[in-house]
Amino acid sequence: MGRLTTLLWAVEHHECDVENEVICAPENVNILFEYKEPWFSVGPVNFTRTSFLIFLAAAVVIGLLYFGLRRNRLVPTKFEAAIQSLVEFVRDGIARDIIGPEGVRYTPYLLSIFMLILVGNLFELAPLINFPITSRMALPAFLSLITYVIFVFVGFKKNGIRYLTDTAWPKAVPIGLRWLVGLIEIVSTFILRPITLAVRLFANLVAGHLMLSLLLGSGIAFVLAVGEIGPKAGIGVVWFAFGLLMFVFELLVGVLQAYIFTLLTAVYIQTSIHPAH
Amino acid sequence: MSTRLWMAILAQEEAEPSSNVSLVLPETNELIAGIVAFLIVFFFVWKWAMPAINRTLEARQKAITGKLEDAERAKNEAENLRKDYEQQIADARSKGNDLIEEARKAAEAMKADMIARAQAEAEGIVSKAREEAAQEKSRAMGEARREVANLSIDLAERVVGKNLDREAQLGLVDQYIAELERG
Amino acid sequence: MEGNIELLKGAIALIGYGLGAVGPGIGIGIVAGNAITAMARQPEMTGTIRATMFLGIALTEALALIGFVLFFIA
């Protein structure tokens, strides 16, 4: 079964040299992110702890939406009001405000990715889980690939071949610079957009998870080793306090990254519908 | 030197298969789990959540619009009622003022009447008293005249010593007194 | 020898990422600062400005993100 939570990695693996080091840093950071031990296998596919967490996130999303929207009541409870305002925010604040009136039909996709990424990000802070599934490249890469397919498809559907030619040969730019701007636009739209969309989410969550694991893990390890190292265990208190600060900051980052991913998806769809802007 | 460095780096990478690159590449197992989980969420949202939220929000919007209209109507009604009441109050006030005015006039008339009557009565009393006094005076004068005449005649009889013609003497005295009064 | 080369590799990658993050850092600062100015001037346009700001940040940030990935690949 392996490690239950990576947060306690430093405690469980007493590789940490509390006598000579000042912080418990692993030799290889992959140890904080990779869970390769299969719980069980379906054919060639292994079901690992990360797979379980991904499905758990999906279940949490469905549960939140189900219990938030189940009853069609005029006076919702606090929980129902929160979920409903979240859905309204995605529908009105992102889909309609960014894409326009025709953007409401993209709400199911935007809401799905928003909720999945939000829950996946906040798994980092959930007790006993402490692992953001979005810090594994699989989920961001897949979601950004779907976004890529959608906005390219919408672009060609709405504008035909002009979607490509307008991007590569922008009429608004002076002719001398046109080829250069066109090249940058092509690279930026068709290559950089999907990569950065995925990497932004992934990188933020990797950094957050690293910071939290190192700080909180080191804090716990040093405080627990107070019998061996004496007053040096005070370092652990400092690391733990820093870790708590980062904890609050990661809450902000988790929500903001989910919002930015969804917002950029909406912006990309919008620029595909109206490439002239 | 340069070749040796490269060889060393290459050898090292071969010696350590789990390099950092694996962190930025999606892993197949997790990719499959992610795809399945996303599809589940997406179909749930598409088929169930969106109709549900649209239904709820529409119902709420309708209810709120209805409530707003109700409130507007109630407000208008209240406004009308208020105007009615104000009208009524104004009417009542003017009516009250009229009543007071009327009562005041009546009271004044009554007062004037009473004063006039009282004056008349007082005048009546005074004139009667004056009449009576005048009568009394004339009666007293007549009596006194008669008394004076008799006394004068008695006195004269005594002086003259004989009976005088009483009637003729009385006439004389009266004449004399009348002359006195005139003079 | 091998340990030294490993350390060197890590250090060079760190320097590379640090250099790569300078430009985007300045750029994001400029984008966000101008967005705040714009929002202060026209508060009614806040929604549009915010979306455009995130788009600009996304474009600027791309370089830093490439640097981040290269750090792990190197």
Image (cartoon, coloured by chain):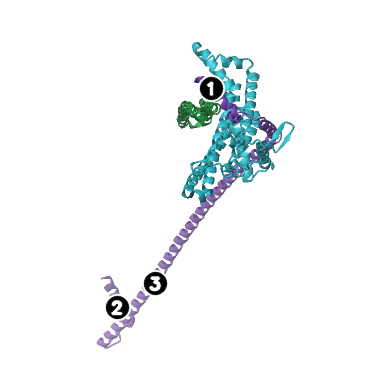
Residue highlighted by disc 3: B129
Answer whether labels 1 and 2 touch (C-beta < 8 Å).
no
- Label 2 sits on a secondary structure element that is helix
Q: What color is chain A drawn in? A: cyan
The residue beneath circle 2 is: B173
Q: Amino acid at mark 1?
A: Trp
Q: Which residue is mark 1?
A: B6
- Give the Cα separation between the discs numbered 1 and 3: 160 Å
Q: Are marks 1 and 2 on the same chain?
A: yes
Q: Chain of mark 2?
A: B
Disc count in the image? 3
Disc 2 marks which amino acid? Answer: Val
Q: Chain of mark 3?
A: B
SS state under label 3: helix
Query: x and y percent of residue B36 in the render?
Result: 70, 32
Task: State which quarter of the image contains the C terminus of chain B.
Answer: bottom left
**Which secondary structure, mark 1?**
helix
Q: Earlier in the sequence, mark 1 or mark 3?
A: 1
**Chain B colour in the picture:** purple
- Of the chain colours in the picture, the one used for chain C is green
Which residue occupies 35% across, 77% down? B142
Q: Identify the amino acid type marked 3.
A: Ala
